[in-house]
Image (cartoon, rainbow, N blue to C red):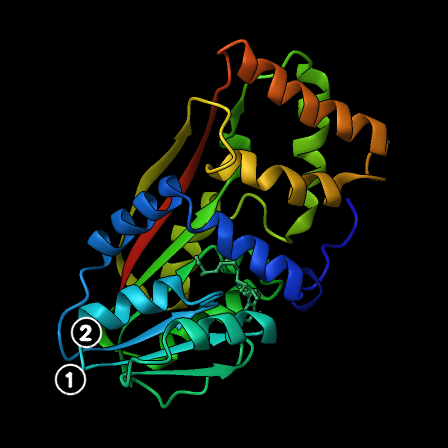
Amino acid sequence: MRQAPSAEDQFDEQASRRLESIYLTPDVVAQRAQVMALLQPRPGQHALDIGCGPGLTTQALAEAVGESGHVLGVDIAAPMLTLAGHRCASMKQVRFELCDVNALPCADASMDLALASQVYEYVDTIDAALVELARVLRPGGRAVLVDTDWESAVWASHDDARMRRVLESWNEHIPHPQLPRTLKRRMEQAGFEAVTATVVPLLNASYDRQTYSVGMMDMIGNFVVGRNGLSADDVAAWKADAATIGAENGYFFSLSRYVFIGQRR
Ligand SMILES: C[S@@+](CC[C@H](N)C(=O)[O-])C[C@H]1O[C@@H](n2cnc3c(N)ncnc32)[C@H](O)[C@@H]1O
């Protein structure tokens, strides 16, 4: 398996805007609401949004903690922070900083809660990064980590072998494509207790550009061309097949997001 590209390389201006529009589709909006319900932010709390991306989660956190609270959004990709800054411009309780998750710009034990949605799977130095996360949370403070295992994907196709090659190649976009399998143990080793895991499914039962899976096909397609023998023609055929299955009323995509909640010891 080739080394995954860095997050800065993956999230240039165009990719950041593309991801923002995908994260605004109704299925992803509903999923975000489920994660926020698990996080249970309260007015007045100090919250950290790690790898905040376009600021959708930051905005939700800021609404929940209110003006008596504070939200710090951090990300390593400057184009993401530009989008996030625009989104939250009118919210006085929000601040953003460009940084790596390995060096959070926060004092020890200064945060009540932290959210990292689809972030740690991108981080090579995952165990050190979790220790850094534990450092900034106060004892009893809560961390909510959301990550994906693409082997949980069920994606209808007329060519299952090609679909498998596409998904195996897509796994190469991050250093930890199966992070949920080890995350509970890693969190406990980093200083968290009472770690629980739950699953938030994402289901698309029709071919619709306003869904996560159809929206992701360009991003996945661009990434996998040239990997594991996949040509541009293979990828074009893979995309066309999804539309064909959709026209046959057979489109089906399901993916699990795993949510881990831990308390700082
Ligand atoms: C898939 S996006 C998720 C964005 C956001 N959390 C959400 O759910 O809407 C992953 C984000 O993590 C950020 N990221 C990845 N590695 C990072 C690192 N080492 N330090 C800080 N941010 C990182 C990326 O730049 C990107 O914005």
Task: Say which residue appears at 45% left-offset and 51% top-offset.
Answer: 23
Task: Residue 67: give x, y in percent of width and height.
Answer: 18, 82
Vertically, is 55 above or below 21? Answer: below
Q: Amino acid at mark 2?
A: Val
The number of callouts visible is: 2
Task: Say which residue appears at 68% left-offset and 60% top-offset.
Answer: 10
User: Is residue 234 shown left or right of residue 210?
Assistant: right
Does the rendering let one see residue 264? no
Task: Residue 133: give x, y in percent of width and height.
Answer: 41, 73
Q: Residue furthest bottom?
A: 107
User: Would you name the residue on which mark 1 appears?
Assistant: 68
The part of the image, by quadrant, that contains residue 197 is top left
Task: Say which residue appears at 58% left-offset and 63% top-offset.
Answer: 123
Task: Say which residue appears at 50% left-offset and 57% top-offset.
Answer: 20
User: Would you name the residue on which mark 2 appears?
Assistant: 65
Q: Looking at the rendered structure, which numbered label has been put on residue 34?
A: none
Q: Is mark 1 within 8 Å of ligand 1?
A: no
User: Is residue 198 shown left or right of residue 154?
Assistant: left
For mark 1, give the secondary structure: loop
Q: Amino acid at mark 1?
A: Ser
Task: Residue 189: give x, y in percent of width and height.
Answer: 41, 63
Vertically, is 136 above or below 170? Answer: below
Does the rendering let one see residue 163? yes
Task: Residue 202: give x, y in percent of width and height.
Answer: 39, 35
Circles 1 and 2: CB atoms closer than 8 Å:
yes
